[in-house]
Amino acid sequence: MNVSTASTTAVQERRSNSAVWLGLILAVVSLLSQGLFFLKVPGQNALPWLSLVLATVAVILVLIGVKRAFFESQLYRGKVAGSIVTVISLLVFAVTVFGFVTARKIPGTAGVPQVGQKAPDFTLVDTNGQKISLADLLSTPVGNAHPKAVLLVFYRGYW
Amino acid sequence: MDTPEVSRDLEKKAGYTFTILSDPQLDAIRHYQLVHAGGGPEGHDIARPAEFLVDSSGTVRWTNFTEDIRVRARADEMLAAARSIPSQREP
């Protein structure tokens, strides 16, 4: 009876494993931050790096927490939670790294028209099946004004 | 690469008033050296994302080339670039 009481007290005194929970929060924030790409917020070029750093720090924190749970189990709780969160954070990390690498596997811009150069003319078909050239776009009045510029957007996907 | 029909549906649905051009043969995309070989769904060749502001003399005045297909130019960046170009004569 005494022994049982003593061990219960010892369990209650073990610290909550904050590294595991902080790691989980960062993993979730990393995942959510990847939705910000499509919102077009200022500083957007840094966002992929932010997601990557968050996911990496999440894994490191969770591993620190799990190490505590298993090797300092008299001090820290979290063996079960830590194991589950390890799997979650590793999945988030894998998804983040895969997305990061895949999304950036695009050709460079060697040979692309640069500022100050003439934009190559082209003739393509619009949504009514009519042929339209860049020269047409640059010379067709908009309302009653001569267009001062044309914005060309080469896109993939609709965001 | 969207066909003119697919783009027409998009135009209607979204209410776009700007011109949408289709480049199924990659004519303009090749001219602008923007081909992303095998970059599209099912390994089709498509364009890497790119934005150009061309003034009425046909000169490129502003460009944006993302390094990450998820990250694109914002409308306010493009508008600021357009505003920096002086107005042209009346037609």
Image (spheres, coloured by chain):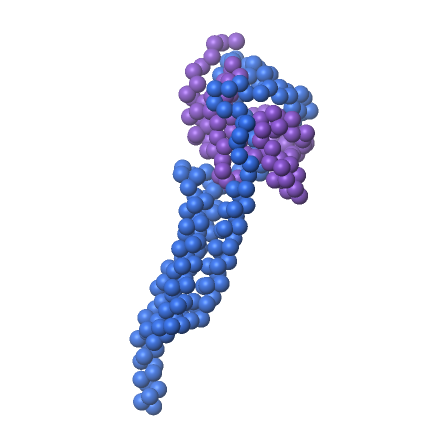
Q: Is residue A148 above or below residue B1?
A: above
Q: Residue at x 44, y 18 (%)?
A: B85
Measuring from the top left, give residue B70's x and y in whole percent.
Answer: 51, 41
* Colour chain B appears in: purple
Judge whether residue A158 can be spotted in this image: no
Residue B5 place in picture, x, y as percent: 68, 31
Front residue (pair A43, B45): B45
Q: From the viewer's perspective, is residue B24 above or below residue A48? A: above
Q: Quadrant of residue A21?
A: bottom left
Question: Quick check: A35 left or right of B44?
Answer: left
Q: Is residue A135 left or right of residue A33?
A: right
Can you see residue A71?
Answer: yes
Q: Could you say where residue A20 lies in the image, as x and y percent from the top left?
A: 39, 63
Count of marks placed on residues: 0
**Could you tell me which residue is drawn at 60 percent across and 16 percent down?**
A136
Which is nearer the eye, A50 or A36?
A50
Q: Residue at x 54, y 42 (%)?
A: A105
Q: Position of residue A91 (x, y in %)?
A: 50, 58
Q: Is residue A7 above or below residue A138?
A: below
Extreme-bottom residue of the structure:
A1
Q: Quadrant of the N terminus of chain A?
A: bottom left
Q: Decide which of A4, A61 is in the foreground and name it.
A: A61
Q: Chain A takes which shade in the image? A: blue
- The residue depicted at 45 percent of the width and 22 percent of the height is B82
